[in-house]
Image (cartoon, coloured by chain):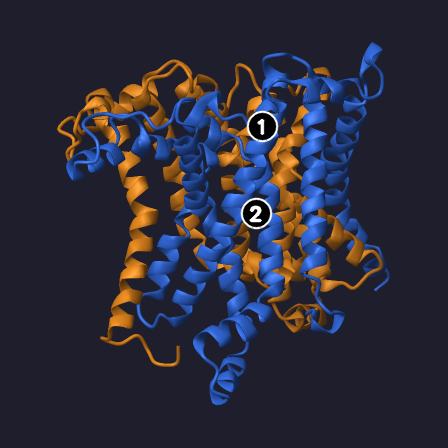
Amino acid sequence: MPTSRWLPYLLIAPASVFLAVFFAVPLVQTIVLSFDGGPAGLWGNYQRMLGDLNFNVSLRNTFMLVLTVVPLQMMLAIGMGLMLQKMQRGREVVLWIWTIPLGVSDLAAGLVWLAILQNTGYLNTFLFHLGVIDGPTAWLNSETPMTLFIAVVVAEIWRSTAVVLVIIVAGLQLIPKEFGEAADIFGASAWQKLTRVTLPMLKPSLQSALILRTVLAFEVFAAVYAIGGRNIPVLVGEAYVWQRENQNYSVAAAYAVLIMVISLAATAVYLRLLRQKPEAQA
Amino acid sequence: MTKPAGSSFKGWLYGSGVAVLCVWVLLPIGLIGLGAFGGRPAVYQWPKTLMPASLSLDQLAVFLKIDGVWNAALNSVLAASMTMVMALLLGAPAGYALARFSFRGATMFRLMILLTRAFPLAILALPLTVLFIRAGLYDTAFGVSLVHTALALPFAAMITASLFAGIPRELEEAAWVFGCTRWQAFVKVVLPLALPGMAAAAIFAFVISWNEVFAASVLTVQQRTLTAYLLTVLSESPLHYRFAGGFILIVPSVVFIFAVRRYLFALWGVTSR
């Protein structure tokens, strides 16, 4: 058919054009805007960003959140995936329950944990009945940065582990049963099977999950804001403040570029660390 | 690992692990539900009882009557519906092309789709503000849905690609033999088979838009979506309103995810590599 040579291009054209307009153009615009420092020169916006009182704190908070949340949720999701694999009855139901948070936004997740952790919340009631505290206690203000941080970590793990779980379950299903059986025949322990067979075979899934979650974790914002307000500044939150409250789009763009550079660097690190041999790829 | 979980201590440990994790997921949603239906008295009750006395639908209705809430919810539904339609209209043809043709540039296109994931896409809404003001798209549900479509489109293309790849090519070829054009064959043979999966892709797009906070907040002032509205009133609204808002955000997307749970794995399985 003569049409079939052009047909695929015709079919991908709308999507390509759309992504070019709403992905490539704003990308370039953000970069241009961030270097448009006016009288302050090319790096003016970046200098303002670096000199911002909240910059160092927000950078540190963001990194600490990513470095705490992502490893913990990877381990949790792998554990959950292995539990599901072993399960004989009720696997469907359990899988459904465990993937419910997929539908929960970061803002809603923050509000959920605010309901539990607020002064007269459920956690405090529980601690009160245990005799640990005498009355309503505040955990989420600037005086308690440690518990505030833990609260955000808990909310993020609660919400975003589900997507890692789905990726891992999909990956586990692709591992042929024979590999595990062979390991059994050679007398491998459960731990050996996990570290020598399952995890290496799961590498592509782990890579996908790590990239996806790390990029999203660097974007963390609404959950933090819902739980701690501005008591725990993060990078995206600062970009939002510069854009909305200070009406300074250029410094906001500098923040956006920084977040993008960090995300891309993290992706590159994962691609390199978890490199697959070409023949192992599907 | 080989032995099925039996009545041993190990089996008990395993069973309770599963149960604890189920509670870990479900309990918080239940608790924000109590916060939403309990209203002010339940939020400030101390110490809390398992069932607040003030539990009633009225409390949630009060929240919905606040000026702006209903409008925000409507905007969210509008933006999410438009995102759903656009993501599918743009994504499904691309998915079909990836599944059925091998053409120069296919790998490039696939890579571009994957590349979008390495970028914090929502943040790209920042410079769009200026562009949108000029184009008259600023502060409209349609403007928000354009950015959300950029978020959802890669997913829609990937789900539909794996969907179409799963429908045997021979079925289509048989239709051509019987004199159908490519389009007729697609509409009469492929589309009915792909419809449930495409509905799932559409619902994913809806949920992505419904839940998105950052771009929606940056691109609206009056015509806020529900997430943007909640974010801006967060610091000044009383706790029970926040919980009601959070609960209303959660319910539809959880129901939707339940409806499409079978397709979750098509999204993250082989094709996502």
Provide the residue designation for mark 1.
A58
Image height check: is A122 above or below A265? Answer: above
- Report the chain holding disc 2: A
Locate residue B140, reporting x and y percent: 59, 21
Quarter of the N terminus of chain A within the rendering: bottom right
On the picture, is A197 further left or further right than A259?
Answer: left
Q: Secondary structure at mark 2?
A: helix
Residue at (30, 34) in percent of width and height: A116
Q: Nearer the viewer, residue B73 or A244?
A: A244
Q: Amino acid at mark 1?
A: Ser
Image height check: is A273 above or below B78? Answer: below
Residue at (79, 17) in percent of width and height: A44
On the picture, is A107 further left or further right than A271?
Answer: left
Image height check: is B179 above or below A29? Answer: below
On the picture, is B244 further left or further right than A42?
Answer: left
Residue B163 visible in image: no
- Report the chain holding disc 1: A
Q: Secondary structure at mark 1?
A: helix
What is the distance, in whole Å, between disc 2 and disc 1 at their CAs?
19 Å
- Which one is closest to the eye, mark 2 or mark 1? 1
Q: Residues within 10 Å of mark 2 (few under 14, many from 20)?
A: many
Locate residue B105, reporting x and y percent: 83, 56
Residue at (67, 54) in percent of width and height: A270
Q: Amino acid at mark 2?
A: Arg
Chain B colour?
orange
